Amino acid sequence: GQQLNQSPQSMFIQEGEDVSMNCTSSSIFNTWLWYKQEPGEGPVLLIALYKAGELTSNGRLTAQFGITRKDSFLNISASIPSDVGIYFCAASGGGATNKLIFGTGTLLAVQP
Amino acid sequence: KAGVTQTPRYLIKTRGQQVTLSCSPISGHRSVSWYQQTPGQGLQFLFEYFSETQRNKGNFPGRFSGRQFSNSRSEMNVSTLELGDSALYLCASSPQTRTVSGNTIYFGEGSWLTVV
């Protein structure tokens, strides 16, 4: 099935470090969403982006909707052990559908 | 405000059987969509319902079907189960308040289906 290109695939960092991950696509999208998923749970929405160039923060998390509408990045500052999980980007064409295309995921491990 | 509720959380079925999964969206949300998550394929879109009408469908065989009721609750059904249908099935709901850009989409905790 269709997936967005998400990188890196995994990250192993020390507590306190900053983290950056991104997603790219060959198609244009009108909405980018970032989710975090922990084992055995469903994805939890972190940040939603609706406009090209938009930069949005949620606590230590910052995400941007690329100007070309084909990419997005997520930054996590001063990571803590509870940041551990798999982070997914997802994109939608918007309008009359909420169909999401997901990225392949970034596994984040934080060592105390 | 209650989140997206999915039942059952875990189930085991035998090849050839059928299964029905249920989803209650967030109160006031009229759009419900379903996704399949597997280690190999990641998160894949199954179908989307809005006001009891299917308005988008993913690339899955006809054994996968769904419906939405007038109260926005939704069910999905998988008939003639195959081993490869083992997956986490996720339901998502959205308020559908935007008409140009996309909408915020919230997921339930999922239903873990194991086919043996």
Image (cartoon, helix red, strand yellow):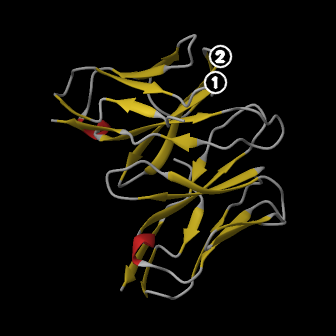
Residue in the image at 65% along x and 16% along y: B51
Compared with residue A12, is residue B7 higher up or lower down, i.e. above or below? above
Looking at the image, residue A111 sits to the left or right of residue B71; the answer is left
Residue in the image at 56% along x and 14% along y: B71
Residue in the image at 26% along x and 32% along y: B82
Residue A67 position, x and y percent, is 84, 66
Which residue corresponds to mark 2?
B51
Instruction: Name the residue at the front extreme.
Output: B1
Q: What separation in Å lies between label 1 and label 2 (alpha carbons)?
A: 6 Å
In the rendered structure, are the residues bearing label 1 and label 2 in contact, judged by CB atoms less than 8 Å apart?
A: yes
Residue B60 position, x and y percent, is 47, 32
Which residue corresponds to mark 1?
B30
Residue A102 position, x and y percent, is 56, 53
Quadrant containing the C terminus of chain A in the rendered view: bottom left
Looking at the image, residue A76 sits to the left or right of residue A86; the answer is right
Residue in the image at 37% along x and 50% along y: A41
Q: Amino acid at mark 2?
A: Ser
Q: Which of B1/B99 is in front?
A: B1
Compared with residue B73, is residue B99 higher up or lower down, i.e. above or below? below
